[in-house]
């Protein structure tokens, strides 16, 4: 009867342990993902703050301030959401561990009671003489052998019960330690969120003040934005023409029609294009440290309604005089001086191009074979905003591609 009872406890215990272990593994993986996301957001916020300190300017335009605040508010809001998710997940884990500890305590109580009962019964019949008499009273050698085996099994059973009691006690202690840590982690997350919410409220108040100020002179600010967008569009058209000219030149050199919209390629260039394409999503950033301030495609202005901004690449804010590097091996096909004293470098990778705009102090020349990570120049600083922003584009022939699809973690 005792064996059946112990076997039942053991089977139920194993099932519960397996079930809770699988649940814990799933939650641990989710917790790791949330922690990685939280750390990434904190790092991005720290980088934004560092760039603000290194790219200082005595008078920063209201539009620039609003854009910065909009980024900070978005990052901090995301951070609060992720931290809340972590705290909620910890709450579930704490509740599950409390339930697990309660079940373990019940199992331990039953095991101890069963073990105590067995010890009492064993003590009453415990004597060397009784064991010898138990063996000598056997009717045959076979029966004596079976009784010897039974005594061994009984001894092993007692030992196994003792080990089970020790194991359950250890599990309770470990679960209790885990609970203490989880409760501490949860309190730390809640405290961090409390501070973050206060900062968020301040940033929103400041943003509201700036937005009110902007709306008083909205026509003036809209004109500024439109002028900047027109300048960006003009540079894009200039880049489009330079690429079209490069395609026509490659086809003329290969003896093909100059009206073709794609690069004429040698076998080596075909192989390079295939290699470039194979690294989609794994290219390095064109600067060592930086953050994307404006993404590819169309986006609504964060403050002024009805204003749409268009970008043919991505704008990356980085450190003053930061080195710009090639994201992949290729050949410099064009180096073009743009209006405002900035320089654009075109690097061809078969029928793909990477374009680097807003440079100075160029370290390459047209026709150079460029290696992976080779420095090609430095980012220039914008006289109006005081920021050092690299515009980075990816093209396939004349088609504009989203750099975030090509660069790792962009």
Image (spheres, helix red, strand yellow):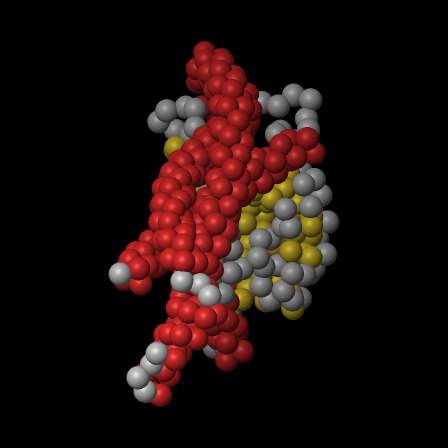
Q: Nearer the viewer, residue 15 or 298?
A: 15
Could you tell me which residue is drawn at 50 percent across and 80 percent down?
267
Percent across and percent down for residue 2 are 30, 59
> Residue sitting at 44 percent across and 18 percent down?
219
Residue drawn at point x = 37 percent, y = 24 percent? 305
| Relative to 358, 362 lies left or right | right
Is residue 192 in view? yes
Foreground of the two, 217 or 124: 124
**Which quadrant of the figure has residue 64?**
top right
Vertical comparison of 52 with 346: above or below: above
Q: Is residue 339 left or right of residue 197?
A: right
Q: Nearer the viewer, residue 360 or 7?
A: 7
Q: Taking 159 as reference, is 309 above or below it?
A: above
Q: How many marks?
A: 0
Q: Vertically, is 243 above or below 70?
A: below
Using the rendered view, name the quadrant where residue 145 is placed.
bottom left
User: Which percent across, then down, holds residue 68?
Assistant: 54, 29
Residue at position x 50%, y 51% from top? 170
Q: How far across and down, in percent of the image, does residue 304 sit? A: 41, 23
Residues 399 and 4: in front is: 4
Q: Quadrant of the N terminus?
A: bottom left
């Amino acid at each position: 009867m005792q064996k059946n009872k112990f076997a039942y406890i053991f089977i139920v215990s194993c099932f519960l342990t397996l079930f809770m272990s699988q649940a814990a593994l799933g939650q641990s993986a989710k917790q790791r993902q949330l922690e990685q996301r939280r750390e990434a957001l904190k790092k991005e916020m720290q980088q934004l703050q560092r760039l603000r300190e290194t790219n200082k300017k005595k008078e920063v335009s209201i539009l620039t301030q609003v854009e910065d605040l909009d980024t900070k508010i978005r990052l901090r809001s995301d951070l609060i959401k992720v931290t809340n998710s972590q705290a909620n997940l910890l709450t579930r884990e704490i509740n599950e561990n409390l339930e697990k500890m309660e079940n373990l305590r019940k199992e331990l109580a039953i095991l101890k009671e069963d073990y105590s009962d067995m010890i009492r019964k064993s003590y009453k019949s415990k004597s060397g003489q009784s064991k010898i008499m138990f063996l000598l009273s056997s009717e045959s050698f076979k029966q004596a052998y079976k009784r010897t085996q039974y005594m061994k099994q009984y001894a092993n059973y007692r030992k196994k019960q003792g080990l089970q009691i020790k194991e359950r006690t250890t599990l309770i202690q470990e679960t209790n330690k885990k609970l203490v840590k989880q409760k501490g982690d949860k309190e730390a997350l809640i405290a961090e969120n409390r501070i973050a919410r206060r900062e968020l409220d301040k940033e929103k108040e400041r943003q509201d003040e700036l937005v009110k100020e902007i709306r008083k002179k909205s026509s003036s600010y809209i004109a500024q934005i439109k002028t900047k967008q027109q300048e960006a569009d003009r540079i894009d058209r200039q880049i489009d023409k330079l690429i079209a000219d490069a395609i026509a030149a490659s086809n003329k050199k290969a003896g093909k029609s100059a009206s073709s919209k794609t690069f004429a390629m040698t076998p080596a260039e075909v192989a390079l294009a295939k290699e470039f394409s194979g690294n989609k999503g794994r290219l390095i950033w064109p600067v060592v440290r930086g953050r994307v301030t404006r993404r590819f495609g169309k986006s609504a202005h964060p403050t002024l309604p009805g204003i749409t901004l268009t970008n043919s690449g991505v704008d990356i804010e980085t450190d003053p005089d930061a080195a710009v590097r090639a994201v992949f091996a290729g050949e410099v096909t064009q180096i073009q001086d743009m209006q405002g004293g900035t320089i654009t470098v075109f690097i061809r990778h078969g029928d793909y191009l990477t374009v680097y705009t807003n440079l100075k102090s160029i370290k390459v020349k047209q026709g150079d074979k460029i290696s992976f990570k080779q420095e090609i120049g430095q980012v220039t600083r914008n006289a109006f905003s005081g920021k050092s922003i690299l515009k980075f584009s990816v093209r396939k022939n004349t088609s504009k591609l989203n750099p975030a699809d090509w660069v790792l973690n962009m």
